[in-house]
Amino acid sequence: MNYLYLHGFASSPQSTKARYMQQKFAELGLTLHVPDLNLTDFSTVTLSEQLQYLDRTYLYNNEPIVVLGSSLGGFLALQLAAKSLLVQKLILLAPAFGFSHRIAKALGSENVTEWQQDGIREFYHYGLKRNVNLQFQFFVDAQKYSEENLTRSLPMLIFHGIDDDVVPASLSEEFAKRRSQVTLKLLNDDHALGKDLDSIWQATKQFLELS
């Protein structure tokens, strides 16, 4: 079994959760792959390009894989499972369900229109710790993807903070209600899910039957 962790939007493999999870897997003698989803240039990246990269890098050898994902990484993990039966289990941390809708709502229609007219818009990149321009094509491409793209059933473990003001926990609750193989754990936390990583790890280890 291979293990893959996908970081969030404008983040990096050096995020707190990514490094924590990678260390915990290593303690069990397992490799957790944490690719840089900024690819060659964050300013020109799209979800489609990220998925193509993940497909050719981690799904080429026909080996089963477990995918963990945080925020947008969780949304991407879901899209990867929709594309490939090799993805056998998902662990999603505050998954960014309704991603393009969340962006549009957060920015407001006037700012989205301005982004379209200008072709680029600045976003704060947490990995680079500075503002970086992102092309409007990112938003156009993102609208092709929805959590509803996943029509098959597979075991999923979702963690979501009840105080998440970026992606409401209600989205994970609605998603879980419609799917029998989803285990949802609501936590007293916000979108970062950094308050009790040990509990998240213990539940992850149990879900994956790791020892």
Image (cartoon, grey):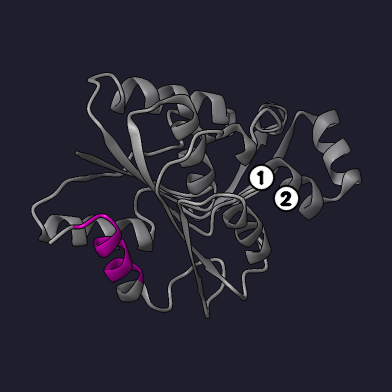
Magenta region, residue range:
200-209
Q: Do the numbered discs 1 and 2 sit on residues whose CB atoms are within 8 Å? A: yes
Q: Position of residue 196 (x, y in %)?
A: 38, 78
Picture quadrant of residue 118: top right
- 27 or 80, which is in the foreground? 80
The secondary structure type at the circle numbered 2 is helix
Q: Quadrant of residue 16?
A: bottom left
84 up-or-down from 193: above or below: above
Tag 1 residue: 99
Q: Residues within 10 Å of mark 2 (few under 14, many from 20)?
A: some
Residue 9 appears in the picture as rendered: yes
Q: Residue 113 in the image: state x and y as whole percent.
A: 88, 36
Is residue 45 in sight in this rendering? no
Give the residue at the far right of this rendering. 110
Q: CA distance from mark 1 to mark 2?
A: 5 Å
Residue 89 vs 160, above or below: the answer is above
Q: Give percent across and percent down for residue 50.
A: 47, 29
Residue that appears at 50% across and 30% down: 82
Left-right relation of 122 to 23:
right
The amino acid type found where label 2 is placed reads Arg
Location of the C terminus (image quadrant): bottom left
**Residue 140 drawn in magenta:** no
Label 1 neighbour load within 10 Å: few <14, some 14-19, many 20+? many
Between residue 28 and residue 110, name the one nearer to us: 28
To which residue does mark 2 refer? 102
Image location of residue 110, percent across then percent down: 91, 45
Q: Residue at x 68, y 27 (%)?
A: 144
